[in-house]
Amino acid sequence: MKSLAELSAIREKMKEKVVLREGTGETRVVVGMATCGIAAGARPVLNAFVEGVSKAGLTDKVTVTQTGCIGVCQYEPVVEIFEAGKEKVTYVKMTADKAAEVIERHLKGGHVISEYTITNYQL
């Protein structure tokens, strides 16, 4: 960092990500970030949701957060989506590529991708 202007630019860039992760959107995307989730690759999934929701212009409607253990370690990385008036959707064995698809088809298009949900796996 070489100047106050550069620091200010970094601050503004990061401000949007903080609002996205602490916002009050009507839809919440929650990524399991316990040790098991992180070991299974949850960090790139979380980053993909934060960046993808921002790029898609959904920051006023969607909040991306993280949580600890969701309780289904064998299916990590796990992402839960909570939408007002709808049943929770739990996506399992997520990747950054699947996250991009969930943003397009579910968050933007309103269609649950059933092949990625926990109900598609035998518990």
Image (cartoon, grey):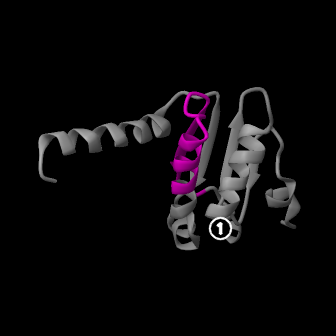
Residue sitting farthest toward the left: 3
Whether residue 68 appears in this view of the structure is no
Residue 40 placement: quadrant: bottom right
Residue 60 placement: quadrant: top right
Amino acid at circle 1: Cys
- State the residue at coordinates (12%, 52%): 2
Q: Is residue 66 left or right of residue 119?
A: left
Whether residue 22 appears in this view of the structure is yes
How many discs appear?
Answer: 1
- State the residue at coordinates (85%, 65%): 121
Q: Is residue 54 magenta?
A: yes
Query: Which image quarter is the C terminus in?
Result: bottom right
Q: In the image, residue 71 lies at what x, y percent?
A: 65, 59
Q: Is residue 122 magenta?
A: no
Q: Nearer the viewer, residue 99 or 118?
A: 99
Q: Nearer the viewer, residue 12 or 61?
A: 12
For the residue carrying disc 1, how many other residues have a C-alpha within 10 Å: few (<14), some (14-19), or many (20+)?
A: some
Q: Is residue 102 left or right of residue 39?
A: right
Q: In the image, residue 102 lies at what x, y percent?
A: 72, 50
- Position of residue 73 relative to residue 80, above or below, is below
Q: Which residues, given as a range, are shown in magenta?
A: 47-69
Q: Nearer the viewer, residue 10 or 121?
A: 10
- State the residue at coordinates (80%, 56%): 117
Q: Which residue is mark 1?
A: 73
Q: In the image, residue 46 lies at what x, y percent?
A: 54, 55
Provide the secondary structure element on which disc 1 rests: helix
Residue 91 placement: quadrant: bottom right
Q: In the image, residue 29 lies at what x, y percent?
A: 62, 43
